[in-house]
Image (tube, rainbow, N blue to C red):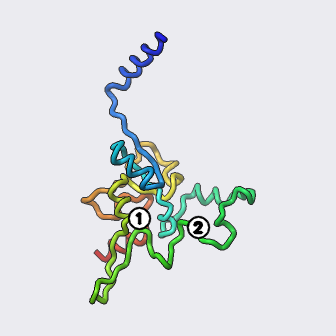
Amino acid sequence: MRWKKHWNDAQHAACAHLTLQVAYFGDSMRSDVFPATIFGKWETVMVVEEMEGDGVPKSDAAVSNEAQVEPQEKRGKFEGQGMKSPSAGSNQWGSYFVDMRRMEGDEEEHQKLTWCCHCIHTYSTMAIPSVEHIADLPLDYKFPRFSPDKPSTTGYYPRPPDSLLKRSEHL
């Protein structure tokens, strides 16, 4: 047991001058990103598959993974059944990121960020469509970050969704 005290002392001495930084990756605002931001005070990366349904291309790694033939039992329930993947855009509901609204007595549609998009900007450091998009980047890569004083298109990697780009053109 004596080694444990020495190990703890050595570990504390080695790390005492370091400021530890945590980047938490999650795909659920409620279970992952919100608690990590609010309670842990950590940097958070929101994995938002809906970005791929809104014009952000799949990563090369994801495309090559899809090209490999998998046994039928390992395929997802949406593959080969004519069903859209959950990240596909919806004609019924519109964009995951931008809502189109008509004000009473106004002919023109107004674009407003959805509640989901607002939460992504408020509680995430950045958003990516999948971890595969950043897997090959160097560790010191400087990612764009969400910030109240930056445009709503900043903070998405590799690029913002089409609906946000169109909205920013109208502002």
Q: Is residue 148 above or below residue 4?
A: below
Residue located 54% across and 58% down the image: 59
Q: Where is residue 60 in the image (x, y as percent from the top left)?
A: 57, 58
Q: Where, quadrant-wise, is the C terminus in this rendering?
A: bottom left
- The outermost residue toward the top is 2
Q: Name the residue under label 2.
A: 85
Q: Which residue lies under the disc numbered 1? A: 160
Task: Give the answer, above or below, for where 36 lies relative to 100.
Answer: above
Mark 1 neighbour density, 10 Å: few (under 14) some (14–19) many (20 or more)? some
Callout 2: few (<14), some (14-19), or many (20+) C-alpha neighbours within 10 Å?
some
Name the element at disc 2.
loop
Instruction: Reply above or below: 127 against 43.
Output: below
Q: Which amino acid does label 2 sit on?
A: Ser
Across and down, in percent, residue 70 comes to: 72, 57
- Say left or right for 89 vs 126: right
Quarter of image, res 103:
bottom left
**Residue 158 percent location from the top left of the image:** 45, 59
Amino acid beneath label 1: Pro
**Mark 1 secondary-structure assignment:** loop
Q: Is residue 140 above or below residue 7?
A: below
* Label 1 vs 2, first from the N-terminus: 2
**Residue 14 located left or right of residue 137:** left
For the point 33% across and 33% down, the residue is 19
| Quarter of the rendering containing residue 166 | bottom left
- Kindly identify the residue that appears in the image at 42 percent across and 14 percent down: 5
Of the pair 151 and 85, the residue shown nearer to us: 85
Give the number of the mark in front: 1 or 2. 2
Residue at x-position 63% and y-position 57%: 64
The x and y percentages for residue 127 are 42, 56
